[in-house]
Amino acid sequence: MKKEIYWLVGTLILVIVLHFFHFGGEGFQPGTQFDVEVFDTYFAMSSLYFLWPFAVSCFFLVYLVKVIATAFSSGPANLVLMITSIFLLLFTTRGSLIMAGVLQGQVLVDFATAMVVIQLVLSVLLAYTAFRTGNLKKYGW
């Protein structure tokens, strides 16, 4: 269990360092904004609103590699992967709803198709991880 706390803290430090390198010291202040251009539409959003999806994505990628490397044998790592998978499902759903108002035509169809594929992959991974976690005897789950 002590090792899992080190992994959590290490991943959190990675997220903070990457966010700092991308936005600088001002990136942690609430008033700092950045622009995202999608075709002819600009989204101005706080850099702190970017931090949550970025942090969840980093945790997901780190723990996906960790869980695959340990062959789904670590209960706490599986749990973190399942939680981040659920949050990524929520973020992709919200992002799809936002982008549906901006995109049009074939680009919208392609984007919606990509989001559905991503959500299906995340759902299958979530179900498989839950199944493997349920079969673990080591942690009494």
Image (cartoon, helix red, strand yellow):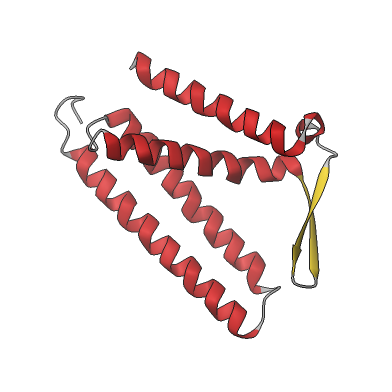
Q: How many marks?
A: 0
Query: Vertical placement of 110 versus 90: above or below?
Result: below
Give left or right: position of 129 versus 22.
left
The percent coordinates of residue 43 (x first, y second) are 78, 59
Q: Nearer the viewer, residue 24 or 109?
A: 24
Give left or right: position of 59 versus 14.
left
Q: Residue at x 21, y 25 (%)?
A: 139
Q: Residue furthest right?
A: 31
Q: Nearer the viewer, residue 36 or 79?
A: 36
Query: Vertical placement of 59 versus 96: above or below?
Result: above
Q: Residue furthest top?
A: 2
Residue 15 quadrant: top right
Q: Residue at x 25, y 33 (%)?
A: 70
Residue 134 quadrant: top left
Q: Residue at x 49, y 66 (%)?
A: 115
Q: Nearer the viewer, residue 13 or 124?
A: 13
Q: Residue at x 67, y 35 (%)?
A: 19
The percent coordinates of residue 20 (x first, y second) are 71, 31
The percent coordinates of residue 24 (x first, y second) are 77, 33
The percent coordinates of residue 118 (x first, y second) are 44, 62
Q: Residue furthest bottom?
A: 105
Residue 98 quadrant: bottom right
In the rendered view of the protein, which quadrant contains the N terminus? top left
In the rendered view of the protein, which quadrant contains the C terminus? top left
Give left or right: position of 5 versus 46.
left
